Image (spheres, rainbow, N blue to C red):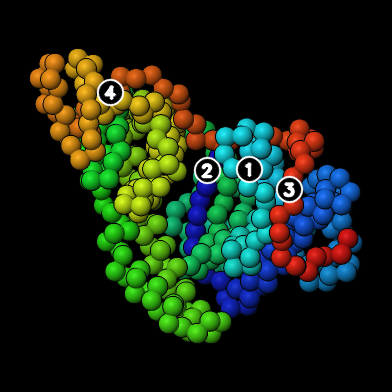
Amino acid sequence: MKAYKYKLKPSAKIVAIFEIWLRLLCELYNAAIQERRDAHRRCGVSIGKKEQSAQLPDIKKDRPDVARIYSQVLQETLNRVSLAFQHFFRRVKEKKEKAGFPRFRSHRRYDSFTYPQSGFKLDQKRKKLHLSKIGSVKVHLSRPIEGVIKTCTIKREADGWYVVFAVEEAAHKITVAPDQTLGIDVGIKVFASLSTGEQIDNPQFLRHGEVELKKAQRRVSRRVKRSNRRKKAVKLLAKKHQQVRRQRRDFHFKEAKKLVVRFRVIKFEDIQIKNMVRNHHLAKSISDAGWRQFISIVAHKAEEAGGRVEEVKAAGTSTKCSRCGQHRKMPLHIRTYRCGACGLIIDRDHNAAINIKERKGRTVLSSRRSVATVEEARTYRATDPESPTIKRPRA
């Protein structure tokens, strides 16, 4: 499976329909969560996707505005609710992270809807996308689509509307990299130090864009709440953040491509980023680097190239001599490793990268994590969080 993302050029009429659909689907999403919560709290009954989907015909009779939405788009919204609860039950079962009961969504943060099987048709020659019950939309096809389109997702972003096609490729040609292993030590001053001695500079996109971001944030703060000028200021701020996010992601993809072409096995430290960002002096720089996103992208690219990514234990990679194995204390401000046993003098991060390369680790998969089924977690008694009052579709 592969995703293709294109910019849409919708008319004002189509944009209005998109906005209406998102508001109604957000309402349906929140109502489905509330129904499940209330059924469990009051009656001890677990409601699944099947029971909620069976109520859609009655909801359409009572709500003509909901009836105007394509039926499979409504089904996909209920499927999102089902996935949210399945992931919640999985986290409860694993007990490795905070469970996080599924939350209600604001209409400002519900930004996409999906045609899961049918209801859409792409004309690549005319560069138009026909959406059932909406109409035709112009598409900026920046590259041709190779494969069979399975799903179509309409997404709202800060700078406009996009379409994302999930495509199934018939065959993928794998270009196997040379049988070489690489160790990578990620950092802040230098984005990554390789076991070969090379370094990847840290572009610090957030730091460089901070001046413009602060100006945009102050503009939002000065505007009157719920005014049109504030909405425009919020949109401008979102675009600034989007630019930083896209620069970082583009940098990660380009560097990942360079690595997977040269090395078949790439190893990283198994770092606990959630714990590291608790340091208020380094939190912004760590978030700006985006290590976890970079590791995920490298894992995805490595699988496409016939290689793999591994994570090794981080303990002692910086304090162990890569030549003789002697350990010594290394405060963070000391950037050069000097071994008292064998006399090795080497950059701290380069030494860590070599140690990472020599360690055995676990393979990092880029595929989506498996989730527990709802039936496996029916015995779990969920706590009842506070919830806002929303207008529920009648069953």
> Mark 1 or mark 2, which has the lower sequence index?
2
Where residue 94 appears, as percent x and y from the top left, is 62, 32
Q: Which residue is depicted at the point 57% across and 76% down?
A: 11
Looking at the image, residue 144 lies above or below residue 2: below
**Residue 173 at least partly seen:** no
Image quarter for residue 341? top left
At 17% from the left and 37% from the top, the residue drawn is 335
Amino acid type of the residue that numbered disc 3 sits on in the rendered structure = Thr
Of the residues under marks 2 and 3, which one precedes in the sequence?
Answer: 2
**Residue underneath mark 3:** 383
Foreground pick, 110 / 388: 388
Q: Is residue 157 left or right of residue 208?
A: right
* Residue marked by disc 4: 355
- The residue sitting at 50% across, 54% down in the picture is 5
Mark 4 and mark 3 lie on one chain; the one further toward the N terminus is 4
Q: What element carries label 2?
A: strand
Q: Which amino acid does label 4 sit on?
A: Asn
Label 3: how many Cα within 10 Å (few below 14, some 14–19, many 20+): few
Label 2: how many residues lie within 10 Å, few (<14), some (14-19) or many (20+)? few
| Type of the residue with mark 2 | Lys
Question: Which dot, 4 or 2, sits closer to the camera?
Answer: 4
Q: How far apart are marks 4 and 3 (CA)?
A: 45 Å
Position of 33 relative to 305 (above/below): below
The quadrant of the picture occupied by the N terminus is: top right
Between circles 4 and 1, the one closer to the viewer is 1
For marks 1 and 3 on the same chain, the one whose residue lies earlier in the sequence: 1
Q: How far apart are marks 1 and 2 (CA)?
A: 30 Å
Q: Mark 1 points at which residue?
A: 99
- Frontmost of labels 4 and 3 is 3
| Label at residue 2 | 2
Instruction: Tell me: 135 left or right of 277.
Output: right
Residue 81 placement, left or right of 38: left
